[in-house]
Image (cartoon, rainbow, N blue to C red):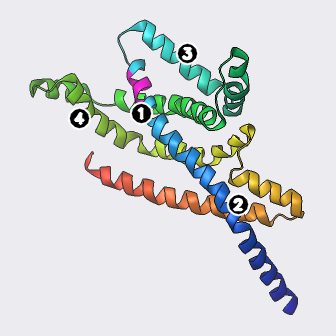
């Protein structure tokens, strides 16, 4: 019994020692996560609108962009932007390079989700807005987009949860994110405890996000 208690004390002390490093890594993870959403969601909506455009050339360009982003690994895109652009005499710092890759990649996924949501809105909504004298811009932002957003919330939530875990890929450009700090500590101390702590932090983070997304979905319940 005493041995078990001693082991618990050692785990608690080790956890206390590791938490400051874990919080630093979590800060990097949250920064990449938040900034990616800020850039990727508006870009995804823009790409979705372009995909629905009457201009064939614009549609084809967007189709190719989506194919490229979804058809190649995110890690490869991060490496190409950070290490490949300098070959073209375009040097991009680590954080902007990572955010550019993440934003372009996730915007492609968001674009297809929003395109499906916008396409699912009944044509009568457009006709009704036209009868009311609303401009195309007002029709889209005040009538179509809110309804589409409600319909696409579940797949958007899935992508948001996936993004939390994908942030670990920033190790490719040398960032000490949450997972990298855990792996480094595991190799240094020959213990799996750091990775257990990382898993617990990820689980708590995803739990909080799930609750927030559920609250947002409930807020949009009046669009039925």
Give the mark, 4 or 3, whose residue is nearer the N terminus.
3
Is 219 above or below relative to 172? below
For residue 8, which quarter of the picture? bottom right
Q: Residue at x 68, y 41 (%)?
A: 170
Q: Is residue 167 magenta?
A: no
Residue closest to the far bottom: 2
Circle 3 packing at 10 Å, graded few (<14), some (14-19), many (20+), is few
Instruction: Compare marks 1 and 2 and give the one earlier in the sequence.
Output: 1
Q: Which part of the image, by quadrant, shows the N terminus? A: bottom right
Q: Which residues are magenta?
A: 45-49
The Cα–Cα distance between marks 3 and 1, rounded to whole angstroms, is 19 Å
Q: Nearer the viewer, residue 91 or 159?
A: 91
- Asked if labels 2 and 1 touch by Cβ distance under 8 angstroms, the answer is no
Q: Going 68% across and 21% down the picture, which residue do you hit?
A: 85
Q: Secondary structure at mark 1?
A: helix
Callout 2 secondary element: helix
Name the residue beneath numbered marker 1. 42
Sort mark 4 into few (<14), some (14-19) or many (20+) by Cα contacts within 10 Å: some
From mark 4 to mark 3, how far is it between C-alphas?
A: 29 Å
Tag 4, which secondary structure?
helix
Spot the residue most to the right. 190
Q: Position of residue 134 (x, y in %)?
A: 14, 27
Q: Which mark is residue 143?
A: 4
Which residue is found at the position 23% from the left and 26% from the top?
137
Camera-side residue of 142 and 151:
142
Are the residues at dot 1 and dot 4 in contact (C-beta closer than 8 Å)? Answer: no
Q: Nearer the viewer, mark 1 or mark 4?
A: 1
Residue receiving disc 2: 198
Q: Which mark is residue 64?
A: 3
- Residue 187 seen in the current view: yes
């Amino acid at each position: 019994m005493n041995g078990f208690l001693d082991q618990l004390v050692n785990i608690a002390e080790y956890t206390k020692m590791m938490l400051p490093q874990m919080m630093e890594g979590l800060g990097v993870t949250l920064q990449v996560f938040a900034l990616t959403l800020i850039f990727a969601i508006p870009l995804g909506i823009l790409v979705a609108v372009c995909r629905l455009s009457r201009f064939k050339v614009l549609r084809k360009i967007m189709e190719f962009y989506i194919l490229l982003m979804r058809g190649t690994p995110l890690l490869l895109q991060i490496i190409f932007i950070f290490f490949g652009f300098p070959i073209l005499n375009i040097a991009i710092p680590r954080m902007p390079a990572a955010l550019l890759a993440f934003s372009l990649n996730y915007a492609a996924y968001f674009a297809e989700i929003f395109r499906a949501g916008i396409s699912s809105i009944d044509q009568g909504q457009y006709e009704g807005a036209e009868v009311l004298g609303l401009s195309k811009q007002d029709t889209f932002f005040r009538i179509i987009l809110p309804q589409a957003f409600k319909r696409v919330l579940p797949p958007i939530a899935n992508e948001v949860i996936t993004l939390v875990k994908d942030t670990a890929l920033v190790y490719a450009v040398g960032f000490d994110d949450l997972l990298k700090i855990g792996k480094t500590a595991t190799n240094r101390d020959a213990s799996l405890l750091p990775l257990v702590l990382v898993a617990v932090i990820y689980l708590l983070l995803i739990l909080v996000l799930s609750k927030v997304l559920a609250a947002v979905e409930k807020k949009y319940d009046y669009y039925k």
